Image (cartoon, helix red, strand yellow):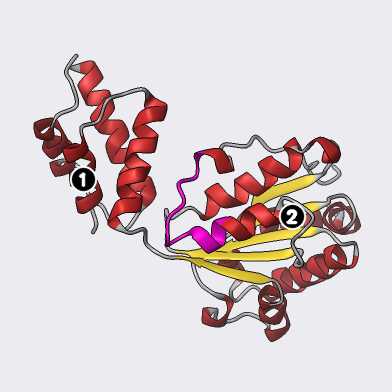
Amino acid sequence: HSPKPIVAPHWRFSFDDFVVGPSNELACAASKSMSNSIFNSDHLFLSSGAGLGKTHLLQSVGNALCSSANRKHVRVACLSSEEFATRMVLAIKARQVDQFKAQFREGIDVLLLEDVHFFQGKEKMQEELLCTMGALRDRGCKVVLTSSFMPKEFSGVDDRLVSRFCSGFMAHIERPDMETRRRIIMDKARRLQVNVPIEVSELLAERITMDIRQLESCLNNLVLKARLLNRAVTMNLAWEVLENSAVQN
């Protein structure tokens, strides 16, 4: 078997549905710049805690590059670091390493790689990623990496790879402030076509501070519960949903 082909990704997110606030403004601007030719750096490193928008921005870059009229045939690989490692292991087992290398070094124009902290302590994988990134840089390709940590916080990672991670533009996404969290809820409610009272949006934004995914999940549950009960979204209903959620704040 030859290595699994890189298929055109299905984009779940775009810049249009990303709510910008002080905590993510730089990361969003850098990501948008990656989608056009004015950006000086071909490499972008996004870091943040879980559920704060790294994947959203990474996917939005790919989505924008594939949508732009002058880049119809852009070849994008969008995958997790674990999937990259699995593909490499399978290629080694199948004695298809040369094909694997060609696929990632010559067969793509853009590499979108999530959770690169996965490579900590994995020497062979690190060497392959280093060579891949070098080849892509030589060809002027774009690379976007995400991680829960900044490169300087990694342990068990080759200094050359850390240096390569740091050679592009780095942007850290902070926890969103209260107003951004409230705007995220209102934006999501608008897309769900449901009326959420201001006091409910403020309650959710006040109670869920750590994770935007959790915030959106709580709103989804609230809307679903209201629809199943054929009721309006109210403070009482919001409190019921919050009490049943494993909320971290």
The quarter of the picture where residue 204 lies is top left
Give the crowd class for mark 2: few <14, some 14-19, many >=20 residues within 10 Å: many
Residue 186 image offset from top left, x and y in percent: 33, 37
- Residue at 30%, 52% in the rendered image: 179
Residue 15 image offset from top left, x and y in percent: 57, 43
Determine which of the numbered discs, if any, sits on residue 192 in the image.
none
Which residue does the numbered mark 1 point to in the structure image? 202
The amino acid marked with disc number 2 is Leu
Along the line of sight, which residue is nearer the eye, 42 or 83? 42
Give the crowd class for mark 1: few <14, some 14-19, many >=20 residues within 10 Å: some
Q: Secondary structure at mark 2?
A: strand
The amino acid marked with disc number 1 is Glu
- Residue at 37%, 44% in the rendered image: 184
Which residue does the numbered mark 2 point to in the structure image? 111
Q: Secondary structure at mark 1?
A: helix
- Span shown in magenta: 17-28
The quarter of the picture where residue 28 lies is bottom right
Along the line of sight, which residue is nearer the eye, 130 or 234? 234
Residue 191 magenta-highlighted: no
- Residue at 13%, 43% in the rendered image: 243
